[in-house]
Image (cartoon, grey):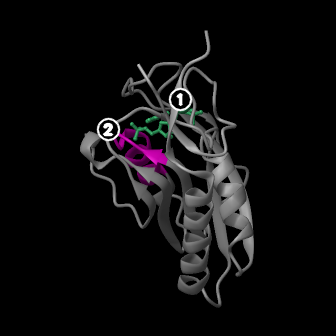
Amino acid sequence: MADKISVLLTEQEVDDKIKQIGMQISKDYEGKDVHLICILKGGVFFMCELAKRITVPVSLDFMDVSSYGDDTSSSGVVKIVKDLDELLEGKHVIIVEDIIDSGRTLHYLMEILKKRNPASLRLCTLLDKPERRVVDVKVDYVGFNIPDKFVVGYGLDYAQKYRNLPYIGVIEQ
Ligand SMILES: O=P(O)(O)OC[C@H]1O[C@H](OP(=O)(O)OP(=O)(O)O)[C@H](O)[C@@H]1O
Ligand code: HPA
Ligand SMILES: [Mg+2]
């Protein structure tokens, strides 16, 4: 049976927000190149749209880190499924995520990536659920703070489904 999904953030709201973040990053990094790291799979839709809105030179890389599997809450175990292709030494790096929830994934990742000597390292997320935080993470660019609800769409999945929705929705129980 199909799940009933209600809209939390419309496609227009998400698109407008990504344009704003893109403009802010372009301003903050004027005269520099930025290296975007997409955290697969959830970050992929956001990164593609964001990259198009940044006006300074952009390079891209991908990392797959998984902590949720097909469940709706974090197992606390973070594993690197695919590492980056490129070195970070001297680069202005922005990690691009779909959501920060418990903070476990990003806390772990920031620690690992800092050790690779980027010129700078920032974190950009489309969604943040501050109420759910278990581990502290400093987030530099946030699209939306959202309530403690399990959301899907724009890269976010429930058991691998609904990543392709062009809006952010909540599965009704
Ligand atoms: O703040 P946390 O509680 O750690 O949760 C956030 C992480 O969980 C999700 O990834 P997931 O491991 O489900 O992989 P996916 O992106 O492939 O769905 C999401 O994309 C973030 O990476
Ligand atoms: O609300 C969520 N939805 C989908 N994946 C997630 N990973 C962490 N939080 C979420
Ligand atoms: Mg997931």
Q: Identify the amino acid type marked 2.
A: Asp
The image quarter containing residue 73 is top left
Q: Which residues are magenta?
A: 99-112
Q: In the image, which disc is placed on residue 172? A: none
- Find out whether residue 111 is within the magenta segment: yes
- Helix, strand or loop status at disc 1: strand
Total number of numbered discs in the rendering: 2
From what the image shows, is residue 85 above or below residue 40?
below
Residue 78 as seen in the image, left or right of residue 11: left
Pointer 2: what residue? 148
- Residue 57 percent across, percent down from the top left: 74, 78
Horizontal side of 67 relative to 129 (left or right) equals: right
Given the image, on which type of amino acid does mark 1 rest? Ile
The C terminus lies in which quarter of the figure? top left
Tag 2 secondary structure: loop
Residue sitting at x 71%, y 80%: 55
Q: CA distance from mark 2 to mark 1?
A: 16 Å
Q: Left of 39 or right of it: where is 104?
A: left
Where residue 5 is drawn, which disc sits there?
Answer: 1
Is the N terminus in the top left, top right, bottom left or bottom right quadrant?
top right
Magenta-drawn stretch, dominant element (helix, strand or loop) = helix
| Residue 23 picture location, percent across and down | 60, 79
Measuring 48% from the left and 66% from the top, which residue is drawn there? 122
Q: Earlier in the sequence, mark 2 or mark 1?
A: 1
Residue 115 in view? no
**Nearest to the observer: residue 153 or residue 3:** 3
Q: Percent from the top left, x then y, of residue 100?
A: 41, 46
The image quarter containing residue 144 is bottom left
Mark 1 residue crowding within 10 angstroms, few (<14) / some (14–19) / many (20+): some
